[in-house]
């Protein structure tokens, strides 16, 4: 379970407050630093996200209420921040809620897809697709 001390709304508010993209990148990196690292034994092909330039792992766990709790990690600072953002968007939701979430609209609101390199943006949407796939199979 992510132990981020922030919400998606906080991220959106902070992005609106920060004018400079360098500051926004630093903020995303800071989000990633707050994620507890995965154990090396969890960094397996089973949990690896395909299509990312960096190494990314997402681990889904179904809780007693039928909500998918996600944990994740990456070997790159900015990408680990993007993983944190994905957890804020999706973790703690039911499979139906995940499938109903328009992550692209949220990311567009943040302006992220326009300010990431094409490879990073592809990786970001690979994470979204992986999470949607997890929800469909749940």
Image (spheres, helix red, strand yellow):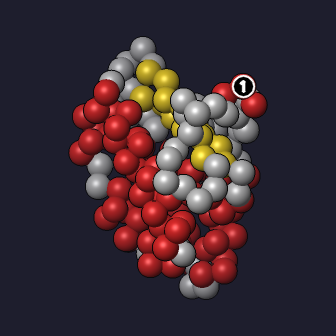
Q: Is residue 137 above or below residue 112?
A: above
Residue 83 in view in this figure: yes
* 68 sits left or right of 40 in the view: left
- Which residue, given by chain and number where applicable, does mark 1 sit on? 41
Residue 17 percent location from the top left of the image: 55, 77
Classify mark 1: helix, strand or loop: helix
Residue 31 percent location from the top left of the image: 65, 55
Q: Is residue 126 above or below residue 97?
A: below
- Front residue of 80/56: it is 56
Residue 41 sits in which quadrant? top right
- Front residue of 109/76: it is 76
Give the total of numbered labels: 1
Mark 1: few/some/many CA within 10 Å (<14, 14-19, 20+): few
- Front residue of 19/42: it is 42
Q: Is residue 54 above or below residue 99?
A: below
Point 41% across, 43% down: residue: 130
Residue 31 in view in this figure: no
Point 29% across, 55% down: residue: 102
- Front residue of 110/78: it is 78
What is the quadrant of the C terminus in the image?
top left
Point 35% across, 56% down: residue: 103
Instruction: Farthest residue to the bottom: give it.
Output: 20
Point 24% across, 45% down: residue: 100
* 50 sits left or right of 138 in the view: right
Residue 64 percent location from the top left of the image: 42, 14
Instruction: Farthest residue to the top: give it.
Output: 64
What is the quadrant of the N terminus in the image?
top right
Q: Is residue 14 above or below residue 95?
A: below
Residue 4 percent location from the top left of the image: 62, 45
């Amino acid at each position: 379970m992510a132990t981020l001390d922030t919400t998606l709304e906080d991220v959106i508010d902070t992005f609106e407050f920060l004018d400079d993209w360098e500051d926004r990148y630093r903020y995303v990196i800071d989000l990633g630093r707050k994620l507890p690292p995965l154990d090396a034994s969890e960094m397996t092909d089973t949990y690896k996200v395909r299509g990312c330039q960096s190494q990314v792992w997402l681990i889904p766990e179904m809780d007693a209420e039928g909500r998918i709790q996600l944990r994740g990690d990456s070997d790159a600072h900015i990408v680990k921040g993007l993983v944190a953002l994905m957890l804020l968007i999706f973790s703690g939701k039911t499979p139906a809620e995940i499938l109903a979430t328009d992550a692209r609209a949220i990311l567009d609101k943040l302006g992220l897809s326009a300010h990431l390199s094409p490879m990073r943006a592809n990786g970001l949407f690979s994470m979204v697709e992986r999470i949607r796939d997890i929800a469909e199979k749940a």
